[in-house]
Image (cartoon, rainbow, N blue to C red):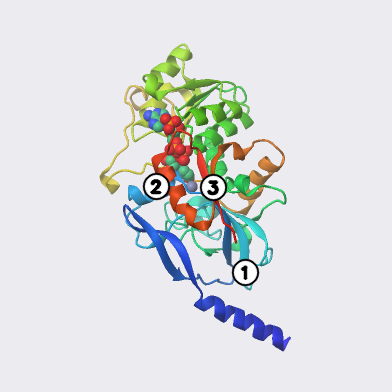
Amino acid sequence: MFILIIISTIHQVINEVKKMKGFAMLKIGEVGWIEKDRPKCGPLDAIIRPTALAPCTSDVHTVYEGAVGDRHNMILGHEAVGIVDEVGSMVKDFKPGDEVIVPAITPDWDNEAALRGYSSQTGGALGGWKFSNFKDGVFSDYFHVNMADSNLALKPEGMSLEAAVMIPDMLSTGFMGAENANIEIGASVAVLGIGAVGLCGIAGASLRGAGRIFAVGTRPISVEVAKKYGATDIISYKDGDTAEQILEATDGEGVDAVIVSGGGPNILIDAFKIAKAGSTISNNNYFGSGEGDRDTIPLPREGWAYGMGDKNLITGLCPGGRVRMEQLADIVTYGRMDPELMTTHVFKGFDKVEEGLELMREKPKDLIKPVVLIED
Ligand code: NDP
Ligand code: ZN
């Protein structure tokens, strides 16, 4: 017993002085590799060593548009699968060595907003989004997870890392888009933007039983996957006005639900124009550019029936937490949707996160989502 205590104390002391490497936002517009102290583990928390990482369009908004404000030497990344390295004294369900899916959003579950059902907004707007926003993210040798029992989920045995790492954000956000859109069986849906988030919106709309699904985008690889996930009509926003094309295809009626997952600040103009009375416009977009609280996002006066059109706009941040991850893992395990169709680039080695992020910034034609596998 005495020897065990000594070993555990030595382990703790070693961890406390350990340094680690991370890929960080140095300031707005600038990224680089930095060294930091290994994070400390509180009693309810865990320290994770990543095994698979995915860069996100949101990282691009954060760094290159300074969307959530300046951050200095903040490690980037919020999409990870990893191995538990250390747990706090009060963690019950996880132990070192467990392979886990880590949600992009890790709320404080005892917070007032969580208790009201809005866990992503705990501690203020977007407060559940801690990684690469309010604290160091997952592009690191080690990273910290608060409330491990409520925020981690075991990765099912046999699930590929490429599939599992799509769960923390892409599946959770894209499916939220479909859930928030209140899609009835047989409803018509338009998904504006078919990167990985919009593609998951299409898959989610299919799972909810949508009838006709319009997919708006141009990258050929995305179009191919959109069809596999259930899109019935492909619209190119480059071939003319998106709203006009969808209105023409629906005899001027528009659609029952719109999921917004791409386009710039004017995209809600298209969304409102094609939304029928009683429909829901479900926004997933992170409107990254702007000048803080002086900036506005336009809505169309006529398309909104002068503010009286019975059209609902709903917004949301990716749902996080353990139960959400477990449910999404079941979607994959039981073959409801294959996330690996979105993995167009697989890199090996931690250093490749830099290249992965740059790809997300450039968005070449053959890209949907890069994944970085960390090798020992
Ligand atoms: P991508 O950049 O990969 O995809 C954007 C899509 O929008 C592409 O299909 C693109 O078309 C399309 N697009 C561009 N311009 C228009 C236009 N004018 N009209 C219609 N479609 C257009 O992005 P992601 O899928 O990675 O992410 C989508 C958004 O979701 C981002 O803003 C991201 O930050 C946000 N996000 C939000 C989260 C949340 O919690 N709410 C979580 C994660 C991401 P093309 O095929 O031509 O490239
Ligand atoms: Zn993301």
Determine whether, in the image, residue 99 is placed left or right of residue 316.
Answer: right
Residue 200: give x, y in percent of width and height. Answer: 55, 36
- Identified by mark 3, the residue type is Val
Q: Is residue 184 above or below residue 174?
A: above
Determine whether, in the image, residue 272 is placed left or right of residue 298.
Answer: right
CA distance for labels 1 and 3: 26 Å
Q: Is residue 356 above or below residue 133?
A: above
Q: Residues within 10 Å of mark 1 (few under 14, many from 20)?
A: many
Residue, disc 3: 371
Q: Nearer the viewer, mark 3 or mark 2?
A: 3
- Identified by mark 1, the residue type is Val
Q: Which of the image's four quarters has the C terminus?
A: bottom right
Viewer-closest of 362 and 292: 362
CA distance for labels 3 and 2: 15 Å
Q: Nearer the viewer, mark 1 or mark 3?
A: 3
Viewer-closest of 213 and 100: 100
Q: Nearer the viewer, mark 1 or mark 2?
A: 2
Are the two marked residues, 1 and 2, in contact with CB atoms closer than 8 angstroms? Answer: no
Residue 60, labelled with which disc? 2
Residue, disc 1: 87
Q: Is residue 302 above or below residue 353?
A: above
Determine whether, in the image, residue 280 is placed left or right of residue 98.
Answer: left
Determine whether, in the image, residue 72 is placed left or right of residue 100.
Answer: left
Q: Is mark 2 within 8 Å of ligand 1?
A: yes
Q: Mark 3: which secondary structure?
A: strand
Residue 149: give x, y in percent of width and height. Answer: 63, 61
CA distance for labels 1 and 2: 31 Å
